[in-house]
Amino acid sequence: MPSTISKPIAFVASDCHIRTGLRVFPNSSEPSGDILVSFKQIMEVMKAHAVNGNSVPLILAGDVFDTRFCTSSMVAAIRQVLDPLKRILSPLPSLYFIQGQHDATVPTWLEILDSDTVHMHDRRINLNGVDFIGVDFCHRISDLEAYLEKYKDEPPYVLITHFPFSFVEGSYDLLSRYDNIRCVISGDNHVPYKITLQNNVPFYSVGAMCPNRLNDTNSFSYLFLYLDEKDELQVETISLLTRPIFGRDIISEEDVHDLLKSIDVWKACCPFPELLFPVVVIYTNDVKLISYARYMLSPHCHLFVRTYSQKKEEDVRDTSVPDGGLFELKDMFREYIVRNFGEQYGEIAGYLFDACRSSRDVRVNQLKKAIDGLWEIRDKELRNANS
């Protein structure tokens, strides 16, 4: 934790993705208390700051639920969060929030479940002396622009939003046009990061609270906002201890034994019983090794098996090399695009294909390259038409 805290302002978390049965992943039937463990860690820090009646509120920046339809198990899960929050924050509201694309409903589920929660969308709210304005997920960037225009002549504020436009040309430039935004704090991208906009305003991606997908990174966090000794707003990223994801190519029994050692190390140091079983993803085409791995690993982890298609064994250890089948499929896709649209689209086809099989952060970069390429082609066609 930072040492120059003059006044705590708020905590911000995002992308809980509470789903039916609290499954580890959408394609898993295994029960998981991961999101509750992450909330437990946040609430322990909140308790430490709740002294002399000066409570520090919690803001959720969208996608609290994984779907727009709340089941009984999802309601039970969020109640395990709201009830202790009430005890920590009373008499303040138990939770502030905006909605993401996964859980956007009218009325909001959180307000239905607990009248003490506060939906921040299109509202100016002062928390511990700092003004916040919330904007729910917008389907179009022009919709977000309309909200920013509405508040452009008002005093400075912190923008809380759910921003899925990082790959859209000029999206960050839009945010840079509003000098009364002190900083932007956004959900949606599951990877925590910070960038500085053109007008020197910081943009923070909160990151997810726990693993939601097999290709998620092992980096999960929340934000702590506070005023320092100079009364300037600071934002600190705080890491969460979450269930690890071990991914490995298996070409021998020794690889299985190495994974088992990693699992044992995790179990020896894991402080949360709910997270004792790590997620393990193995990659192999060998049926015997799959059977052996299931026998050795299944009792100690959540095991997922993935096979390579037409991949040479000597390539297996380099996880950055796609398997032969994907190479062939990528070439077929590129050839189809070139044949139907022209040679100039060949490189863009490669970017789009890579985006479809990549993790979220890589996907954003590939899509941005594809969009930039399309703009270049358009500009070239316009120049040719005018010449």
Image (cartoon, grey):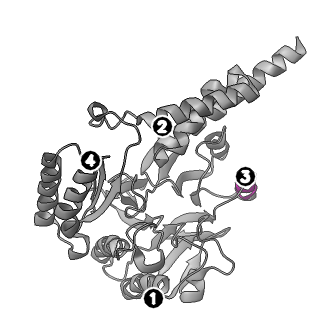
In the image, 354 versus 334, the foreground residue is 334
Q: Amino acid at mark 1?
A: Pro
Of labels 1 and 3, earlier in sequence is 1
Label 3: which residue?
145
Badge 4 density bin: few <14, some 14–19, many ≥20, Cα 10 Å: some
* Closer to the eye: label 2 or 4: 2
Is 22 within the magenta?
A: no
C-alpha gap between disc 1 and disc 3: 35 Å
Of labels 2 and 4, earlier in sequence is 4
Residue 103 appears in the picture as rendered: yes
Position in image of residue 137 (x %, y %): 64, 62
Label 4: which residue?
248
Q: Is disc 1 placed on a helix, strand or loop?
A: loop
Label 1: which residue?
91
Q: Is disc 4 placed on a helix, strand or loop?
A: strand
Whether the residues at callouts 3 and 4 have beta carbons within 8 Å, the answer is no
Label 2: which residue?
326
Q: Amino acid at mark 3?
A: Glu
